[in-house]
Amino acid sequence: MVNRFRVPEPDQTSFRAKVEQAHALLAACAGYVDGTVGRNVDEPDLWVLTTRWIHVGAYRRALSSYDVKLGAWELLGAALDEPSAYEIVEPGEQTNQAMARET
């Protein structure tokens, strides 16, 4: 999952604390594999929270957990309005989209 955020300079200190808390809450959920918080080097107001999950269902269940709803939902709702679910594309392997077209 890739969630990007535009954060004005005056809000970056408080945003960092909130995004780190959101990451910690997500990391405590079943199915979490790993993740990072990043800041764009060319556009410092652009931040990203990237998480990997065993499958998209685990991420969706994490979003439904009480702790995430209470401590991260507001922040995640402020992400840029764009698709956030990506699959890993392995050399020579079919993507989920290709498999879906076959069925």
Image (cartoon, rainbow, N blue to C red):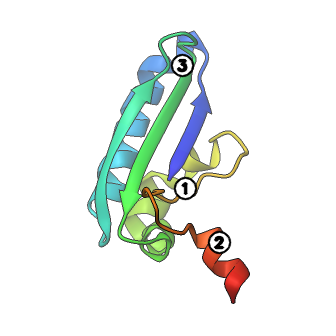
Neighbourhood count class around disc 3 (C-alpha, 10 Å): few under 14, some 14–19, many 20 upward: few
Neighbourhood count class around disc 1 (C-alpha, 10 Å): few under 14, some 14–19, many 20 upward: few
Residue depicted at 35% across the width and 70% down the height? 54
The secondary structure type at the circle numbered 3 is: helix
Residue 4, quarter of picture: top right
Q: CA distance from mark 2 to mark 1?
A: 14 Å
Image quarter hosting the C terminus: bottom right
The secondary structure type at the circle numbered 2 is: helix
Label annotation for residue 9: none
Question: Does residue 28 sit above or below 3 in this rendering?
Answer: below
Horizontal arrangement in the rendering, residue 11 relative to residue 30 (left or right) = right
Residue picked out by circle 3? 11
The secondary structure type at the circle numbered 1 is: loop
Question: Does residue 11 sit above or below 15 in this rendering?
Answer: above
Label annotation for residue 86: 1
Residue picked out by circle 2? 98
Residue depicted at 46% across the width and 62% down the height? 92
